[in-house]
């Protein structure tokens, strides 16, 4: 069952990344929680968001992103201390005016290979974008 309907589909993200820039939030003085729900299994994991550059919400998991390759994940944001269902709007790169900001996005994680060297490419950071 979908937590958010409809979700805004964003570009795939590499599994091998140290951080993901979720998007922009409206209040730089609040804490935020970011939820990732595997649509195949229903499993939900969450992370504490970090603000960088004022209102840019970023996730830096201590043990990395342990997401299943090729499966869809619904991603949403809440203000810390509120309920899991209290989704807020956030601005995703590539979305038009702020009135079109989503409360949920849909993303898949993939492996990115260096075809010349034959190994995974690791990224320091990636950005959710449409």
Image: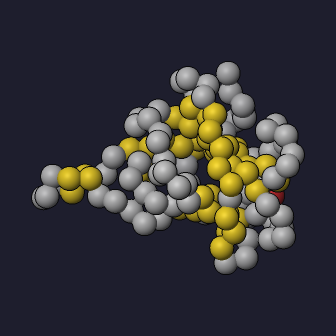
Give left or right: position of 15 versus 42. left
Which quadrant of the rendered structure holds the C terminus?
bottom right
Residue 20 visible here: no
In front of the other: 120 or 61: 61
Give left or right: position of 11 versus 116. right
Give left or right: position of 103 versus 130. right
- The residue under the point 72% across, 31% down is 3
- The residue under the point 49% across, 51% down is 63
19 to 68, vertically: above or below: below
In front of the other: 9 or 86: 86
Residue 67 visible here: yes
Counting from the top left corner in percent of width and height, residue 93 is at: 61, 63
> Which residue is situated farthest in the bottom direction here?
53
Counting from the top left corner in percent of width and height, residue 49 is at: 68, 58
The quadrant holding residue 59 is bottom right
Q: How many marks?
A: 0
> Which residue is situated farthest in the left direction here?
116
127 to 5, vertically: above or below: below
Counting from the top left corner in percent of width and height, residue 24 is at: 70, 65
- The residue under the point 41% across, 48% down is 15
In front of the other: 18 or 54: 18
> Which residue is situated farthest in the front direction here?
62
Which quadrant of the rendered structure holds the N terminus?
top right
- In the rendered view, how is the structure colored? secondary structure
- The residue under the point 52% across, 35% down is 72
């Amino acid at each position: 069952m979908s937590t958010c309907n409809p979700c805004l589909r964003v570009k795939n993200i590499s599994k091998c990344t140290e951080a993901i820039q979720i998007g922009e939030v409206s209040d730089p003085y609040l804490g935020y929680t970011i939820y990732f729900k595997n649509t195949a299994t229903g499993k939900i994991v969450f992370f504490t968001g970090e603000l960088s550059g004022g209102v840019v919400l970023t996730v830096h998991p201590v043990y990395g992103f342990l997401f299943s390759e090729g499966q869809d994940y619904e991603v949403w944001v809440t203000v810390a201390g509120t309920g899991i269902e209290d989704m807020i709007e956030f601005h995703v790169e590539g979305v038009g005016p702020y009135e079109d900001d989503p409360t949920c996005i849909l993303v898949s994680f993939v492996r990115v290979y260096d075809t010349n060297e034959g190994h995974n490419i690791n990224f320091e950071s990636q950005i959710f974008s449409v």
